[in-house]
Image (cartoon, helix red, strand yellow):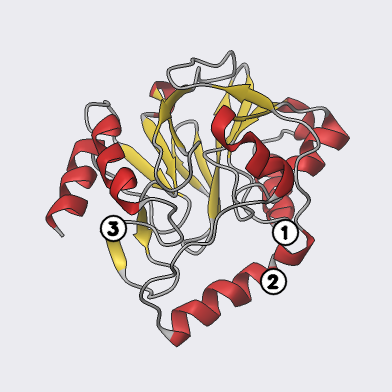
Amino acid sequence: MKLAPHLHRLGNDVVACYLIDTPEGITLVDAGLPGHWHDLQRELQSLGKSPADIRGLVLTHGDSDHIGFAERLRSEYDVPVYIHTADAARARTGEKPKTATGPMRLGPTLKFFGYSLSKNALRTRYLGAVTEVDDGATLDLPGEPVIIGMPGHSPGSVAIHVPLADAVFVGDALTTRHVLTGRTGPQPAPFTDDPAEALASLDRIAPLAASWVLPGHGSPWNASPAEIARAIRED
């Protein structure tokens, strides 16, 4: 689904990942669930492009609902996969600490797990290799994505600022739809390793210039990073 010039979303408000289309090629942000591979193929076809046009995939963190088709893309098309050093092992092994789930409602929780199963969540392949990056790096990829460290949800959670797309991709550093309660609007994400650190990390995106803040779960936020950070803190 096209959101704006250069900017496309794959998936929906339950689980989403993103495509940045430029004349120099395509950059992907996150890889959703394994079944989102078919969404990717349809979006590429609508653009008259193919996986051969993808120059790189940048992960906001290493959780399974963000790396879904990453290994397939890497192993079959030799697309490099970038992730913060602190989450590299998480993406390769799936190992992560247990976290409190917090509030839950039956309907939204079943919808999240049902949708995940429909997108082959149980067939997630962890990464055979990754390219590690650090806070502040500007990647040599279409759109020149900039890595902004956002520790809290995971140690290597990042935001990805792409000025060409007028967007900041935040993964699970925040959410606009709580997958376990169904509550909409800007709020902290569930399954977060360190909630206090995640809240403090919102200061890292507040100064960025962008018209879109794009989470891995929930509706796109068509307003500034400063506004969404303030809305979460005031909630």
Rendered residue at 53%/78% (across/down): 111
Q: Mark 2 points at which residue?
A: 118
Q: Which amino acid does label 1 sit on?
A: Gly
Look at the numbered disc 2 and give the secondary structure of its residue: helix
Give the percent coordinates (x, y) of residue 78: 82, 27
Disc with the residue nearer the chain's start (2 vs 1): 1
Left or right, 171 with respect to 22, comes to: left
**Residue placed furthest toward the left:** 234
**C-alpha separation, residue under disc 2 versus residue under disc 3:** 26 Å
**C-alpha separation, residue under disc 1 versus residue under disc 3:** 27 Å
Q: Name the residue under label 3.
A: 187
Mark number displayed over residue 99: none
Quadrant where the C terminus is found in the figure: bottom left
- Number of numbered callouts drawn: 3
Rendered residue at 72%/41% (across/down): 92
Q: What residue type is labelled 3?
A: Gln
